[in-house]
Amino acid sequence: MTNISAVREVLRRQRIETPSWAYGNSGTRFKVFPQPGVARNAYEKLEDAAQVHRFTGIAPSVAIHIPWDRVDDYEDLAKHARSVGVEIGAVNPNVFQELEYKLGSVCNPDPAVRRRAIGHLKECVEVAEATGSTILSLWFADGTNYPGQDSIARRQDCMAEALAAVYETLPGGMRLLLEYKFFEPAFYSTDVPDWGTSFAHCIRLGERAQVLVDTGHHAPGTNIEFIVAVLLRAGKLGGFHFNSRFYADDDLMVGAADPFQLFRIMNEIVAASALEADAGVAFMLDQCHNLEPKIPAEIRSVMNVQEATAKALLVDRDALRERQEAGDVLGAYGVLMDAYNTDVRPLLAEVRETMDLDPDPLGAYARSGYAERIIELRAEGTQAGWGT
């Protein structure tokens, strides 16, 4: 039987990081859609993120993206984060938007471009130190579009050299998480296209290099929870970029397209006792809200992860193990589905009340008047968005 009191306690301790870029304007490849009240700089992004934490109680950190969130004084940025009730989380370098990166960044055929990219990665290590971050989160758009365009093997050598150069600069306590993506913007070969390539590089680097799983970065039909289980077993699952997809890297709200998949992923996390902070798995959102308002979308996303987690915690592990060991296929499946089909919203409402939170985070935010205030306060100036 599941201990409900223990489940409540785990849910109170859950932590989910939101991304600064979710609070700026975003859109499709064809158009970026502005919204009233959107943050104009990194400081205002932190203020918006603080609202998500205020109403959910479990989103105390904010990932930043450099140079999108570049400021003159990163210690001051961290101080501002603390003053509004959050802290700086993972630092994400950007090595895909400069003209020089047309043929790649750390894998570019031009040694000068590779040096520039590595220099930026090292700069982000310094940013992490200044802000108190313990995670450097890396994603590379590097790859090729045509057979023969470049040497696949040579590019892997360049990737390994770049990662090693950055890894050597990490201070104690900081981790390097290497994300992967099987296509886009490179369509013939991507230099870190899958979890196996990321895993191979991380193994070579050392124990503080781990794989980052973006739930939108997989081919259709990929069993993501299998990847999660294998990486957990190897001690190489560093974290997630949670989002949702129908076709490719859609960056929709986590759990929107396939809530059952999110549950299956969290089921493997709970089964491996990897939900607690000391397990070293960072739970981060990576989403763009093109149509829906930014802050409520992040609150809804945090709630979606909470619901999937609660259901995973309600799985009767003893009963599941008994059915599995007995070869009872339908019985084991039934145990899992009993948990998944449980309405956990009343449970989460109770948990929030014990944390002195409103049981309805979205309703509480709507009633707070924050959305109306920022529309008025931010009427002038340039809104933040992709590339700014």
Image (cartoon, rainbow, N blue to C red):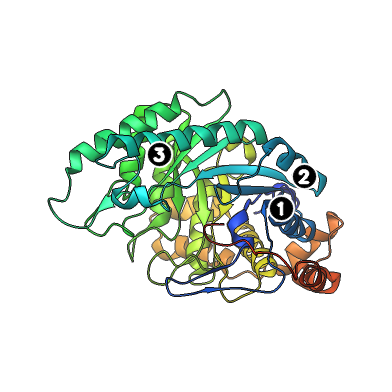
Left or right of 145 on screen, residue 102? right
Say which element carries label 3: helix
User: Is 346 situated above or below 163?
Assistant: below
Q: Within 10 Å of the Cα at label 2, are there few (<14), some (14-19), or many (20+) other Cα atoms?
A: some
Residue drawn at the location 13% of the way across and 54% of the way down = 147
Q: Is residue 165 above or below residue 40?
A: above
Asked whether the residues under the numbered discs 1 and 2 touch, taking CB atoms below 8 Å apart as contact, a structural biologist would say yes
What is the residue that sits farthest to the right in this orientation? 356
Amino acid at dot 1: Leu
- Residue behind mark 3: 117
The one nearer the camera, 95 or 167, is 95
Compute the Cα span from label 3 to label 2: 29 Å
Closer to viewer: mark 3 or mark 2: 3
Residue depicted at x 63% and y 50%? 17
Kindly identify the amino acid type of the residue bearing the numbered disc 2. Answer: His
| C-alpha gap between disc 1 and disc 3 | 27 Å
Q: Which residue is mark 1?
A: 46
Residue found at x 52% / y 34%: 123
Q: 310 or 188, which lies in front?
A: 188
> In the figure, residue 129 lies in which quadrant?
top right
Number of numbered discs: 3
For mark 2, give the secondary structure: helix
- Residue 11 marker: none
Q: For residue 80, which numbered disc appears in the image?
A: 2
Q: Is residue 38 left or right of residue 286?
A: right
Q: Classify the position of the C terminus by image quarter.
A: bottom right
